[in-house]
Structure formats: structure tokens, C-alpha cells
Image (tube, grey):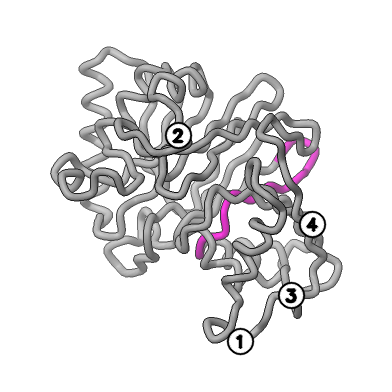
Amino acid sequence: MKIKIWGCRGSIPSPGCDTNVYGGNTTCVEVRLEDGSLIVIDAGTGMRCLGIELLETGEPKQIHLLLTHAHWDHLQGFPFFVPAYLEGYSIIVRGGPRARKSLEGFLAHQLDPPYFPVPFRDLKARFDFQQEDGRSLSIGGVEILPIPLKHPNGGYGYKFIENGKTFVFLTDNEIGFDHPGGLSDSAYADLCRNADLLLHDGQYTQKEYEISRGWGHSTFEAVTELGITADVRRMGIFHHDPRHLDQDLDRYIEECRQRIVLKKSRVECFGTKEGMEISL
């Protein structure tokens, strides 16, 4: 399993010279399975660059798109995903146990007039909106478990298991606050237990959290404690706040590492960066 980060910023794109290291594009993560299957998690602005690379390589023509939820920063790159406009491409859309019409509506709304000049019906790729029953789904023979998120309006993270390696993706998940449909903090720890890689939302400092509690995002301290409790091997802090510059994130990630050392944990902690590639 190979993972590539095309966008890891949260809330709104934040381009500029002070965000070049971690990147300014919003959520889009590529997962390549051993059999060559391509899975794309979310359609944030990072999806545009992914589409350009797919055109350059010409393969694969079948794309599995997993959506976590319908907030704008996770969908706003879809109208600029060029393969969607071309014949010969197949895009299979899934998003946890949601109705097929809901998934189609999430994407089609991004192209609704007067917000965008090209209507969804004019896209040339073949779309397949598949409904899930809440249990694990399978792509390329790999088991993928949808995980309910603690987030306003709900959502789903995903747990991938291939050849004994486990990757858990939990963006927009607020540890320490209960949202309808979410799980307990201990349940998330159990689901992440001994994962080879955990990418988890870590948007706020404790001071910022004083006014953002309940908005659906975790603090650096909370996600670090989750990683320690679950004894994950590698943990990437994800969904960076648009206000956090490169130098800020360097400092916050280092503080997370110091906390891990003080707890005598073996977790390897890092800040996710646009363009980062990870092999499991």
C-alpha cells in the first residue's frame, strides 16, 4: 500500500510563501493498492494536481473515490479534476453507509449554476455511485472499514488493511467532544490499535480550542494522546489550520514529539506535507 498526500490543509486553501513546506491545498489523499487499484480519499483542492498527474501517466482509468463528508474544503477540488471531463475514465464513488443520491448530490452541487459554468450532466467520465451498508467494503481485495466521525453533520473515516499492514485515516474527528453519530474516544483508540500509519485531524492549539470547541476538529494534545493510547507506529498530524504557517507547524509538531517522549511512547509523529509519499 502506498499513500501520497495531495492536500492536507483544513477549512480553506491557504497558498503562499509561508505555507510552502506543508502545503496549502485541502484534503485529498491517494492510496495505491498492491494490485494497482487507485483510491482517492476526498476531493479537496489537492485533487486538481492529482488529476494532472493521472493525465500525464495515462493510468489507471478506474478511480475509486471515497468521500469522508460534504463540507466544502473536502469537495471543492472536484470541478477541476480533469479526468471527470474525459471519456474512458470510470469514477466509482463511495462514502460510508449513505444513499446513492446523497453521494451524487455532494459532487453535482459543486457544479450547480450560478457557482460553476459546467453542469454535472456534461461530464464525460462514467460515474458509479455505490451505497454501502455500514460494514466493511472491498476494493482490489483489500478490506476497508468505514469509521463514523465526531464531526458536525457526521462523516466517515476509513481503515485499510492490506497484507497485514493497517492504515487509518481520520480527518475532521474531534477527540474529547461528543457529536451525534460519533464513537467514544476509547472506541477510536481500539480501531487505531497498533496501526502502521494513522493520519488524524490535529487543527488546533489548546488556546485556539477555547473558541473552536465543538467545531469538529482535534487539538494537537488530543491527537497525540490518541496515538499514544492506541500505540500506533507512525502518526501524521493532518488538516492543518489555514492560519498555521510552516514555522508554527514545525513548533507544534515538535511539542507533540516531546509529549510522546515524556510518556515514554514509541510513536513516530510527523506533520503531513503536501507531496509526501508513504509506503506500507
Q: Which residue is drawn at 61% across and 76% down?
A: 111
Mark 4: amino acid: Asp
Q: Mark 3 points at which residue?
A: 85
Q: What stretch is highlighted in magenta?
A: 33-45
Please, which residue is most extreme toward the front here?
180
Mark 3 and mark 2: Cα distance apart in space: 36 Å
Q: Name the residue under label 2.
A: 182
Q: In the structure shown, which secondary structural element does the residue marked by tag 2 occupy?
A: loop
Mark 2: amino acid: Gly
Q: Mark 1 points at which residue?
A: 117
Does the segment drawn in magenta span residue 111? no
Q: Residue at x 34, y 51 (%)?
A: 240
Please, which residue is most extreme toward the right here?
88
Q: Would residue 64 be seen by someone viewing this image from the given angle?
A: yes
Residue 113 drawn at (x, y percent) = 58, 84
Q: In the structure shown, which secondary structural element does the residue marked by tag 1 occupy?
A: loop
Q: Name the residue under label 4.
A: 128
Q: In the structure shown, which secondary structural element does the residue marked by tag 4 occupy?
A: strand
- Could you tell which of marks 4 and 2 lies nearer the N-terminus? 4
Residue 244 picture quarter: bottom left
